[in-house]
Structure formats: structure tokens, C-alpha cells
Image (cartoon, coloured by chain):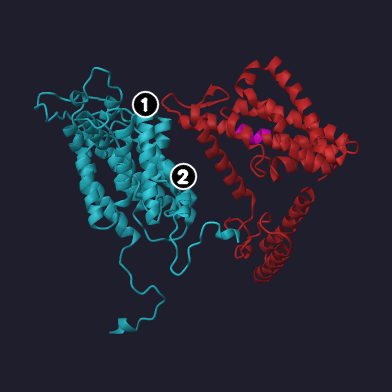
Chain colours: A red, B cyan
Amino acid sequence: MNKCTERLYNGLVKENPTLVLMLGMCPTLAVTTSAFNGLGMGLSTTAVLVMSNLMISALRKIIPDKVRMPAFIVIVASFVTIVELLVKGFLPSLNESLGIYIPLIVVNCIILGRAEAYASKNPVLPSIFDGIGMGLGFTCSLTVIGLIRELIGAGTIFGAHVLPDGYEPFSIFVMAPGAFFVLAILTAVQNKLKLKSATNGDAPQATSTLACGGNCAECVGETCTKNRMMIEQKLDEAAAKKGDVKAVNKNAFPETAGDKTGSEGGNR
Amino acid sequence: MKDLYNVSASPHVRSGVTTRSIMRDVAIALIPASVFGVYQFGFKAFLVLLTSVASACVCEFLWKRFVVKKSAPYECSALVTGLLLGMNLPASVPLWIPVVGSAFAILVVKEMFGGLGQNFMNPALGARCFLLICFAGRMTAFGVEQASSHFMNGAAAVDGISSATPLAVIKTLEAGQNIKDSVSLFDMFFGFTGGVIGETSTLAILIGAAYLLVKKIISLRIPVAYIATFSVFVVIFGGYGLSSDGFYYLLCELCGGGLMLGAWFMATDYVTSPITKGGQIVFGIILGLLTGIIRICGNSAEGVSYAIIFSNLLVPFIEKFTMPRAFGIVKKKKGGAAK
């Protein structure tokens, strides 16, 4: 995987800003009352994110370190203003339903976070792809949250009635509590699918006895190395016992996990 | 004789009280109120209670079977949760509402947070508020299906098919109307009024509460602090003062709505109320204040369920500040920490 596609994968799946990094919670919880609103918010943020990443990355050697935050905010605010005027001009209905949350993109932590963590340290092209990846990750999460909330809370998808007339919508799902329910459940699902942990039934059996269970977000430094050594030792034992193809396949796991920590550590 | 040589770790003196026996006693204590509810609202109420209990038990079973995957002793807590939820629903709801409510109570409020003992909020009330927000119309359609009479006025006056709860009547009294003519305290005490299945009869609830008190399942601290604070609040802010009308109004507020059911059965839930004795009194006072504020200053006539689930959230803080001094530890003087 080259650096650009790696950035896309990173933003969409590995470090999905909503479901993994838990950034930008304010718009996530507030505007996802329908799939369309979620999509609109996500795309507006993506546009700002890509442009600001580009600009900040291009200016990274000019901006003095001491005043980088104000400089970032000026850049981000300019793009947000452009997007805001465009949405007002061409999508007045979206502007009405998103309201104050479009100007508030300025202080969205995803944008400042990416500027600080990635764009200000990396060349222009990967920064653009980082912006696209993160933006698409945000858009996808918001659209899915909006889709579920709209379906359960109003019985529609993108405004079209899909459920039978007898269905009584659970109106709590288009209110604030519904946002928390859906966000929490989606986060739990992605944890279940992605993290190889002690509580995850799909993790290799040999690792499940560990306290960290191979969850790399949990351990640092010496503990991490120790745990990793124990995992490898156990996997070797398991492989020696079974000696079949499956065990060899499972052996691939700690290596990929190691790669993950490596790249994550580099980003932070 | 062999038993005497049994070697085991402490504690050596055990009371024999188990979670299961407590839950069984609570369920027994709820019987009078639910039986009266069925008498009052007809067979439909029985179906609602049954669906609610059955779906709660099924949900818990499925969760234990497919998610926890450990064989734990069955504790009957789903039975109590289901029964309490059913008693908090009007008899007129369609039967899928108790199913949805039970699933929410057991799966979301209780099991997702770690099961019995870990839930931060009373599951039955959490589910009731969830349903109340989702289906406000259905959840407030109180009706008396069985034509029960106002005993006070002779058998002539018959309640209509649907009637407002007495609390709502009191709340919307107009200037000229006399409170004593509008609602009958007698009906409210015995339960011949509209409302949710389990809340109408104060008498039946008090019988159940007396059973729990005799069995020492609950203590008086939370309910008494709750009811006393609420009474003081009503006397001060209710608008009737200490006149005879005021006394009548106070009794109506106490007997009406879910106050009694909430105070004796919901607020005393072990998991979601403070352990410390001082904390239980503080908890009761907060409950009384919140209920008073919601009922008298708020828009809705009823506020017990919101008051209880809100106070549930404060329990960790109440416990933190009312932790008793451990034996042998000298109490810190004020400013002592600064030395």
C-alpha cells in the first residue's frame, strides 16, 4: 500500500474519526437526525478538511511554531466561510437544517487535529489524501448514524418512506438520546469487529489469557513489549501443538498488530 | 457432626438471604397492587403484565445464553423488572409496547452496563421514560375499562371509558372549582381512578410495602424522607397552604400518580440507591424536591419517574459525600489537609 492509499484506509477504517478517535462529537450528535443531514455535514467538513490540510501542509515551513494554532484557525475559518456561503447559496434547505453547525466546523477537532497531527508535518500530497480519508470516514459514519436514526425514528431513508404504514416510529431516535444510543452501538460493533481483544471471540485463543488481550491501545512501552513476547511465545506453543495450516495463519496476527502500533505511534 | 469440621474462608455467619429470595419477596409484595390493577382495568391489564414479565425473562435468558455464555444462577431480577415495567404502563397500550419496553430495560439499561448490580438507573423506570418519550400518546391514554363507581357518591356516578388521572384534574383546576368536588380522595386511596396499572391503589401498594418492611427487605429511610420532603414542598409551594383544602390537596398529591409505587418500590431498588444510611436520607430528600418541582412547577402532572431516574444518576456522588468514618480512623478537621 503506498502512502496515499494508506492514508485513505487509515481515515476510513483504522482511525475513523467518529467511531475510533471519537473526535467531532458535537456535530455527530447534533445534526445526524436524518441521513441527508449527516451526509451534508460530512461532505462540508470533508471539503474544509481537504482544503485546509492542503494549505497548512503547503505553508508548514513558513508558519512559525509559536503561532501555529492561530494561523491554522485563520486558514480553516476562511475555508469554512467559503463552504458556508456555498451551502447557503446552493443548498438552502441543508443550510436551514444544519444551522449553526456549519460555522462551527471551524472549531471541529477533526480539522484542527489533522492539521496539528499530520498536515503540519507532512508533504502536500499525503496531507490531501489524509484529509480525504478522514473526511470520508467522518462522512460515512455520520451518514450511517443518520440513516439508522432516521429509519428507526421516522421510518424513512433519505426522506423516502420505506417501512410499512403500521410502523410507529420510535421518536426518541431522532432526539438527543437516540444519537447516543446509535453512536455507542456502532462504536461497540466496530470494536467487536476490529480489535483483537480478550473479550473478542475471534481473537487467537493463545492471546486471550493476557490482560491486554492484544489490544494495542491499552499498553505502552515495556508492558507492551512484554505482552508481545508472551503472545509470540504462546502462539509458537500453539503452533507447535497443532502444527497445521490454521495455526500458521493465526501466527500472522502479531506481526500485523505490530505494524499497527508502529504506524499509530508515528502519527501521534 | 461432620459439618462442624467444615473448613472455609470467612464470612462464617451467613444470613441465608440471597438475591433470589429478595427478588421473590419484592415480587410477592407487588402482587396486591397488580391484582388490584387487573381488577380495575380488566383482562387487558393482565395481558400487559404477562407480556411484560415474559418478554423481560426471555430477553435476560437470551442475553445470558448468547452474550455472557456463562451459566450464572438465575436471580429472578428480570421478573421483578418486567412486573414493575408492566405496572408502569396504562392498560390500553398495544401488547408490543411492553415487549419493546422490557427489551430496552433488560438489554440496554441493565445488561449492557454489566447486568444486575451494575445498572446505573432503575431498568423499569428507564424503559418507562423511553416509552413515554417515544409514544407519548399511547403512554398517557389512561382508561378505566371496567365501570367502577365512585363509592363516595353512591353507585350512581360511573367513570367514563377514559378519564384523566386525578393529578391532571387537580393540576388544571380552574379558579372557581373546589378541589373537594373535583376529585374523590376515597377513590384515590382505594384506587378507583385512571392511571397506569400498578399505581392507582395506594392501599394495595401500602400492603405490599408493609410486607417488605416486615421482611426487612427495605428500610423506612428512603420512602419516609421522600414522602416527608415532598409533603413539605407541597404545603409550601402547592398554593393551598395549611387550610383544610390544603390538607386535602396534600393527601391527593400523595395518593395520586406514581408517588407511592415509586417511593416504596422503585426508589428503594438496592442497585440504584445509596448504600450509606445518611446517603439514603439525602437521596430521599432529593427525590422529594425533584418530584415537587416537576409536579408543581413543571408542565406535566406527573414527575415521579423522571425524578427517580435523575436521582439515580446522583447516587455515586451522594455515596461519596456520605461515606461513614471507618472504625479507628480519626476524623479530619477542617483545614487539616493543608498542613
**The residue stretch that appears in magenta:** A139-144
- Per the picture, the main secondary structure of the magenta-coloured stretch is helix
Q: Position of residue B308 (x, y in %)?
A: 39, 42
Secondary structure under badge 1? helix
Q: Residue at x 67, y 40 (%)?
A: A23
Q: Which quadrant of the view contains residue B1?
A: bottom left
Chain ID, mark 2:
B
Residue, disc 2: B108
Residue, disc 1: B137
Q: Is residue B265 magenta?
A: no
Circle 1 packing at 10 Å, graded few (<14), some (14-19), many (20+), is: few
Q: Position of residue A164 (x, y in %)?
A: 45, 26
| Same subunit: marks 2 and 1 | yes
- Residue in front for this viewpoint, B187 or A3: B187
Q: What kind of residue is marked 1?
A: Gly
Q: Residue at x 36, y 37 (%)?
A: B291
